[in-house]
Amino acid sequence: MAAGNIVQGALFTVMVVRATMLREPAFESELAQQIGRSPRFFQNAPVVLDLRGVENLVEADEFETIRDKLHALTLTLVGVQNAQPAQLEAANAAGLASFAPTSGGGQARTAPAAAPAAPKTRLVSEPVRSGTQIYARGSDLVVTAAVSPGAELVADGNIHVYGVLRGRALAGASGDAEARIFCTRLEAELISIAGRYLVSEQLPADVESAPVQVALVDEELTITRN
Amino acid sequence: MLAKVIVVTSGKGGVGKTTTSAALAAGLALRGHKTVVIDFDVGLRNLDLVMGCERRVVFDFINVINGDANLNQALIKDKRHDNLFIFPTSQTRDKNALKREGVERVMEELKQQFEYIICDSPAGIEHGAITALYFADSAIIVTNPEVSSVRDSDRIIGILASKSRRAERNDPPVEVHLLLTRYDPARVAKGEMLAVDDVKEILSIPLLGVIPESESVLRASNTGTPVVFDEESPAGRAYVDSVARFLGEQREMRFLKAERRSFFRALFGKA
């Protein structure tokens, strides 16, 4: 029997998970959410771990831990790519194959399903009009234009407004008491951090129309001029 | 030249949309552009009155959408100017009769015949107003110098940027222009009205014109004559200026009266 009959080439689409993402605290829950949306698609799906930008991961049992983690999410880790020699050795010892690096474009096509992008600051450069709500989920929100009365900014992180803030701004919307609000001119209808709020009427007169930052100090919303 | 669809809108009612639609359409016609003005305020038909053609309405916009009449049966040619046409709406139906596919078909047909298609929007942000702005290439935001009108204008600018066909298709955005109407410099000076630069600052869109509060506007409406035909009227002249600016000409803002020095500086100094 000729060897050509035993080994045949074939092309598969494989998902790529970036190893840098594993450090993100939200990684598992985000991935689980994505899988939950189309569980059949992900059932026992093969996954390749992209090691670009990762220096550690040089022990076989580290790869086994990752394999178990992904297995719990119904994914099967089959190999690695962009590995350093030491990483490759450890991966091989854990029974993982080596995949050739993919081009940027190809990676972008296969990766998004499995690798949610790192929380990136949401940037808005158009005026935020009355009746509009912008939610920066899991990140900061930066607005480089005016925010009109009747508009609402919500961010899990900080809110920065480089313009007049006339609408509402709710920072730390998921409960982060460290979040802050910054604006170049405060004329807000309402400001809130981690659920604590002040309405326009309660804002001290001396900070009206001033550049300020708002922070939660001892559970009190504190406004200071910048 | 490809026809341009212009929506005259405001969110708020009673600010001067229909007066502006009539004046703008007549003004463009006077400048030699073949123009039609459409009444989108189904059930509250007014444009025909302001244009003085209410006794000549046979078929309307809804008849054409439903295929009960063809476009040329419904279009009314203005008696004062050959370039000006009025497309009246139905008084007996409501805004739900405005089916988007039907409106699109009528718009495409109008584009074959006209240079400018002016859509006189109903007030509000519901179906009627959304349908009126959906096909727009340009929008004239009619605003009175008072806070509630400014806020509603802001809302409608946001809707233009998110719900128009241009927004849905990711085409270049609808070009928006601010037209401040019923402006009374004396009341501005007394602090009873917002000043033009305050409104500009809040809405941050380019200013097309300021139309002074004027008795001639009411007279024009009641006699069914677009105010641009009244050459004596400050409002009429301000509309003529606004039309010229819309067509790309530079014209100085008039009828603002310099009660406040900073006012002129803000207006001309920044631009």
Image (spheres, coloured by chain):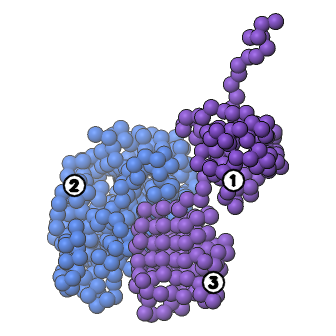
Q: CA distance from mark 2 to mark 3?
A: 50 Å
Q: Which mark is residue B248?
A: 2
Q: Secondary structure at mark 3?
A: strand
Tell me the distance, in whole angstroms, between the alpha carbons under discs 2 and 1: 56 Å
Q: Residues within 10 Å of mark 3 (few under 14, many from 20)?
A: some
Query: Label 3, label 1: how many angstroms apart (C-alpha)?
Result: 33 Å
Q: Nearer the viewer, residue A137 or A63?
A: A63
Is A9 situated left or right of B1 in this image?
right
Q: Residue at x 32, y 72 (%)?
A: B200
What is the three-letter code of the residue carrying label 2? Gly
Question: Can you say whether B69 is above or below A172 in the image?
Answer: above
Q: Which mark is residue B261?
A: none
Q: Which mark is residue A196?
A: 3
Chain with colour blue in the figure: B
Task: Say if B142 sits above or below A62 in the image.
Answer: below
The answer to whether A160 appears left or right of A219 in the picture is left
Q: Which mark is residue A22?
A: 1
Q: For numbered disc 2, what is the local secondary structure?
A: loop
Report crowding for label 1: few under 14, some 14 to 19, many 20 or more residues within 10 A (C-alpha): few
Which quadrant, please, contains the N terminus of chain B?
top left
At x 64%, y 75%, the residue is A176
Chain identifier matching the purple colour in the rendered picture: A
Q: Are discs 3 and 1 located on one and the same chain?
A: yes
In the image, what residue occupies the spot 29% across and 59% down?
Answer: B24
Q: Residues within 10 Å of mark 2 (few under 14, many from 20)?
A: few
* Tag 1 subunit: A
- The reply to whether the C-beta atoms of the residues labelled 2 and 3 are less than 8 Å apart is no
Q: What chain letter is assigned to the residue under label 3?
A: A
Q: Find residue A107 and report its image quarter.
A: top right
Query: Which percent across, then down, holds residue B271?
Result: 22, 67
Q: Position of residue A212 (x, y in %)?
A: 45, 82
